[in-house]
Every structure is written in structure tokens, then in C-alpha cells.
Amino acid sequence: MNQSQEQRLEDIFRTNDNNGIAIAITGSWGVGKTFFWNSFLKVQSIKEQERKYLPLSVRLMHKNFFDKKYAYVSLFGIENLSDLKAAISTNMSSNYFNQESSKNFEIPTFIKKGLTALREVKLTSSEYGISSSARIFESMLYAQVKDAIICFDDFERMSNKLDIKDVMGLANQLKLERNCQVVLILDEDKAEGENKKKYAEYKEKLIDETIKITSVEPLIRANAEGIDTALINLMVKFADELEIHNFRFFQKVIKLYKHFLEQLPAEVAYSTKEIILIRVIQCYFIADFGVKYEFQWENIQLVLEDNQKDWSERKVKTYKALQNISYNFIHSDVWLSEFKKWFDQVDELDLSLLKDLASSELISEKNQILKNKLWDIFDRRFNLIINESDFTFLAELGGDLIQVETIYNVAITYEFIKEYLNDEPKFQKFQKDVLKVLDSDLGQAISRKNEEIRLWGYPNNIFYEHIDKLAENYKEDKDLKGIISHYLQYDYFKEEEDKHKLNEFLLNDWYQYLTVDIYQEKFYLDKDKTIIACLRKLSKIKVDDFFMKDMVVMVLNKIGEESEFKRKYMNDIIKNHLD
């Protein structure tokens, strides 16, 4: 909670205890204005509840300033002034935090509940010929509205049929004629056109005090239960550095991060949790604010200041802010590549895939420590505090680094070792260890290199050249199981060319997979997906003139040839479950 703002609001109420006043709580959309107000009420209610144990003489001398009626009114859905007055009346109650206050003034519940039903009822007197609307009850109830605290919220969602000058005028009347303390929760910058002009005009006449909420920190902390304090601080720092104070953004981040936590063991290294949170923030940041902040996937790489000369002021500011929060925001690794593939493809959370990502060895404690050491050396290099021993240490880690870092980052490390160490055997050993890993699975090496260039546009380097040379004579023999298994599990093809290979496989290949191999898949054994769901997903694939649904139907018809029962069964699947 912003303590200074909360204390100031309390002082305003105490100074104006028995006087009408209008207070505006302002701030950008999603910053937590309503949360601030509700939290303030809760804190004050606790204080006042504790006061009931004080001697009566003390309580009489220093009365509770919340011994008043209270109404919270959302302007969303209210279309005219009459409805607004009715909303105030029906929401009016004694202070719901303080059970001892103003009980005698409580509007009976049955009247409040019956008001809406009675509003359109006509009461007719045949003797006098007078037709009277049941709205008279509204006037009776509204007459009780005085000496109260009234909060108006959701100005940004106010109906076009309700004029803001009417709302402001009513608030002014409540303040001056009914001795009410009126609180208006709004984003002044959201008002548009005539409403903005009218608000500015009435603001001078109506508003006595303004509380401006500028930080989303209280909302983040209140909703981050179960998350390490250091990680909560990281989110707060991100909000402050990037000036993103919309809690709806952090709501998505916290939700996805907590889903990851559920997939992790009870005991997991802080470094692992930190990198997961950073990657989640990165993905949502690029998706929601990437254009505005001029930061995209290809910018997640180390760029020296000399190479930032052609950047806009906004882009430089974004990059430096992210760098200041954590170097992990501006450096990529293999796990980021895998996470981005998943993030770009899924429409909704697939917990089985999250589990695979969360349990990946790429973000194990051991590998995170290794990556952190590498980036610590890079960081110290920029600050002129590295030693020869740092690169002697890295020279022994070629085989380990290539498995967790991007090929490009490993190539940069190789160039540093070669340049700084006057020891040819050391940098040759580093190169040999890296090539041994790359050569052990050339297909994966080619895939990694292509993905790095696609995502980040990395320039050529010694290891890319090595892969390109071997790739000239390489033809990966992919089987149907390998291609389709990846697609069904992750919702995307591992390589774009995999999709185009599908029409090369024969009916017998598909029959083998859909009747035998698929029942050994992890997603089936874990009961994450049904076979029908998989068939439906495959049926939606189209490659050039090849419709996957045709092949699925042929396989099901072949199964139907086994018996009359299976023929009817497969016909039902084809007719009712593939679309």
C-alpha cells in the first residue's frame, strides 16, 4: 500500500469529518485506484473496530470518522440521472465495516430488494383519477441520503446516455446540500471529447482534494501470494522501470507463472524460478507493448552502445531499462527459443506442455548457474573488471555451454577465449568440445541454427559456417511418428518443412501410427488427449493440395473393414467427430 497516499487520504477525512467534500482518486487505467480505495476502507475499519475496546469517554471525545452511511456506486450500466439516484439509495447502508455505526438509519432490506420490481408499477386511484408511479419510493429512499460517504466508480465505462455533467452536478449537490463526502474514482486522461471538456469545467467547482495513484505495486504484492519476495520485487522494478502500471498485464504474468510453479518440484532453485518469470514477462511484454516500446524478439540479444546509434530514443530507453532490471531480459538461450514456440502457438494453457517446459534440464539449477556465470563474466567485461582466469574457466566448458546457450553466444565466447588467451590448445579444445556436441545430432544443430537466425537475425559465425558446410550433404530421414508426435504434443511442427513431408507417407504408414504408435505416446498415456481429439486436430491440416482429413478417413475406413460393428463405429466417428 502506498502509505503516504493512504495517510493523506485519512488526514483529509479527519480534517473534514462533518463537512461535505469531494475527493478525486485518479490514475491510469488498471493502476489499482479501486483497490487503493477498498484497501483504505479495510485498514480504517480495522482501526475503528479496535477502538471499541477503548473507554467510552475516549470514544466520545474522539469519534470514529466512519460512523456514517456508505454507498459504493458503479456508473457502468447506469443510463440516466434517475437510475443513478436509485443506485445510490439502494446501495446506501450503515458503514458495513463498523457494525455499531448508524444502525438506526439502515434502509430495510425488503424495501431495497423490492424497489426495482416496483419502479414500473402504476398505483391508480379510481376515485380521484390520479395515476402515480411507484418511483415515489425512490424519492423517499433518496431523501435519506445525507451525511454519508458516497463513492462513484467506473467513469471510464459510463454509458454515453449518461452525461458526465449530470454526474458531477449530482455529486456537487450531495456535497453542498446533503453534507456528503463524495469520492470519485476515475482516469482523467480517459475522458474524451465533450466529456473531457465538461469534466475539466466541473472539476474546478467540485473537486476539493485529489489523490493520484501512480504505482501498481500494491496490487502486485496483494496478488502474488506464494511467489518469492525477490521475484515480486523484480515485477515491481519492471513496472517502475518500464512505466507499465496496468495490473491486467501483471495479472496475466502472475497467472502463467503460478501455472509453471505448479509443475515444478516443491524444492526448486531460485535461479530456475527467476528465469521462468523473466521469460513469462518477456513474452507478454512483447505481445502487449512490443510495438509501443520498440522491442521485439530479435532485440533479445547483447547490443553494445556503439551499435545503438541508429536506434530511436524510445528503443534505447527500453533496452537500457530491461538491462537494468536483469541481463536475462536482453540475452537469449535455448530454453527461450522453446518457450517462445509454445507461447506463440497455444490459444490456451496446455498444462502437459507446461510441465515439459518447467521440468526441462535447460533451466535446471546446474545449468542456470552455468549461464549466470557466463553472463556475469560478460557483464564484468563491459565494466573492465575481468581476469585471465575467467576465460580460462570458460575454455573448459565448451561442451556444457553449447547445450544450454545459443550457438551464437557460444561463438562469441569462443572468439573472446581465442583473443584474450595466448593459449592455442585451450581455444582449440573449446572449439572441439562444441563441435562434438553439434556433430552428434546434426539435424538438431541445423534446426537450432535456423531458429536462432529466424528469431534474432544473428550474423554468421564459426559454428554456423560449420553447420552450413555439413548441411550441404545432409538429408534428415524423418519418420511419420517423429513429425506427428511433435505436432500433436506441442500444437506446431518442429520445422516448417515437416508439414510438407506429410504427403510423402503412404496409407500404411498412417495406419501404423494411428492404430499402434499413437497409443504409446506420452500425451495419451498421461490422458492429456483423447484419440478422437488427435484425429480432429490432424483433420484440420492442409498442405498445398493435400487434405489431412482425407487420410484420416481412409485410415478409419480401413479399420472399419475388420467387422460390421467397427464399420458402423468408424462411420459415426467420421460423420460426427472430425469437424
Image (spheres, rainbow, N blue to C red):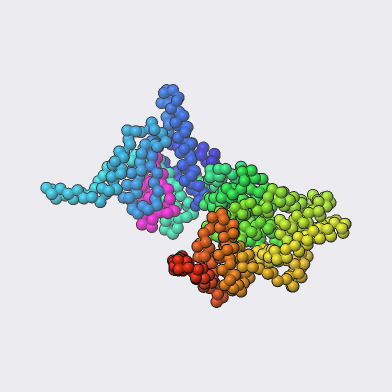
Query: Which span is picked out in magenta?
Result: 149-173
In the image, residue 178 lies in the stretch drawn in magenta:
no
Residue sitting nearer the eye, 172 or 312: 312
Q: Viewer-proximal residue, 301 or 449?
A: 449
Furthest toward the front, the residue is 563
Up-down: is 147 above or below 464?
Answer: above
Classify the position of the N terminus by image quarter.
top right
- When asked about the image quadrant of residue 138, the answer is top left
Would you say residue 171 sits in the magenta stretch?
A: yes
**Residue in view at x 75 percent, y 62 percent:** 440
Residue found 55% across the figure and 65% down from its top:
515
Quadrant assignment, res 158:
bottom left
Q: Is residue 154 visible?
A: yes
In the figure, is residue 88 to the left or right of 281?
Answer: left
**Is residue 285 at least partly visible in the picture?**
no
Q: Position of residue 518 (x, y in %)?
A: 57, 62
Q: Which residue shows up at 42% across the image and 48% down it?
A: 153
Q: Identify the residue at horizontal 50%, vertical 52% (top origin).
A: 29
Q: Check the image and report above or below for 45 versus 61.
A: below
Percent x, y of residue 345: 57, 62
- On screen, residue 369 versus residue 530, left or right, reads right
Residue 358 locus on image (x, y percent): 62, 52
Side (left or right) of 172 relative to 35: left
Question: Which residue, as the protein is rendered here, is positioned at the far left?
Answer: 127
